[in-house]
Image (tube, grey):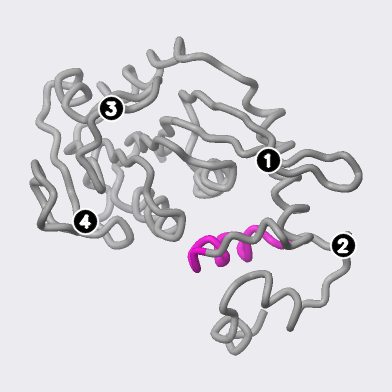
Amino acid sequence: MSTAQEQAWPDYVAWEMSVGRQLRTDHITHKELLQARARGVSAAESHRYTKAMTLIGRRLTAAFPMQSSDNERAFEDAATQTTGPLIEVGGPTPSYAPPLTAVDNVAELIGRKGFVLNKSPNVADVDLMGDAKQMPFANGTLGIVMASCLHHGARVNFFEEAERVLEPGGVLAYQTGRDLDIDHVLALGFNVISYTQNINTYFTMEDGTSIDDRTWSFAAQKPNV
């Protein structure tokens, strides 16, 4: 896709119809999926988008079978091994789904204060002002970064920012993610160590293939090297 095409791309479906003209059997690249996400596009109507999401969903289903919250110990163990500050972005969130827990509970677990970063000055209990898409922290300085329910258009930058600011072995904890979020986190080199997922089918293709509306709460660890 050229720069001119990207700039003229108001939404993914319009781009596909006016520029792409792809066959049903074609599939969108991972980079294009993230570009669509960054633009806040919902492209379930696009054949290429649904094809790509089906492939991602199958891969994640094979790698991450359904699990309950009894794997939260892995999150706790990884969290206690970190040394840098604990930051919740866009919070405070009063409750998280297992294996995660509220920032105050994580702070108590690791014996360090938790700080809440938010770009709105009107939210109570905020310690720092800043944006999820451009966090005001130096590279490799944070121990744990948490967030919940960020707008899907902000998640591309947020996950990349989390990879930048976390120390080696640092932990990213996120609630209410989707398959593309997990796929992006894995592509950034994180290891998903704890998770729960809920699955509901929202779209069935003509060949009978289902596309799942799957939500994740997960903890992922940045490699130590």
Q: Amino acid at mark 3?
A: Ser
In this view, 100 is above or below 10: above
Q: Disc 4 vs disc 1: which is toward the camera?
A: 1
Upstream in sequence: badge 1 or badge 2: 2
Tag 3 residue = 95
Q: Disc 3 vs disc 1: which is toward the camera?
A: 1
Tag 2 residue = 24
The residue drawn where x is 82% and y is 77% is 21
Circle 4 sits in a helix, a strand or a loop, which is it? Answer: loop
Q: Which mark is residue 138?
A: 4
Q: Compute the Cα span from label 4 to label 2.
A: 44 Å
Circle 3 sits in a helix, a strand or a loop, which is it? Answer: loop
Q: Disc 1 vs disc 2: which is toward the camera?
A: 1
Q: Compute the Cα span from label 3 to label 2.
A: 42 Å
Extreme residue in the right direction:
207
Circle 1 sits in a helix, a strand or a loop, which is it? Answer: strand
Q: Amino acid at mark 1?
A: Tyr
Left or right: where 105 falls relative to 33: left
Dots 4 and 1: beta carbons under 8 Å?
no
Question: Picture coordinates of residue 142 (x, y %)?
Answer: 23, 43
Upstream in sequence: badge 4 or badge 2: 2
Q: Compute the Cα span from label 1 to label 2.
A: 20 Å
Question: Picture coordinates of residue 2 (x, y %)?
Answer: 64, 84
Q: Which mark is residue 202?
A: 1
Q: Disc 4 vs disc 2: which is toward the camera?
A: 2
Residue span colored magenta: 28-40
Inspect the magenta stretch and tell me whether residue 58 lies in it. no
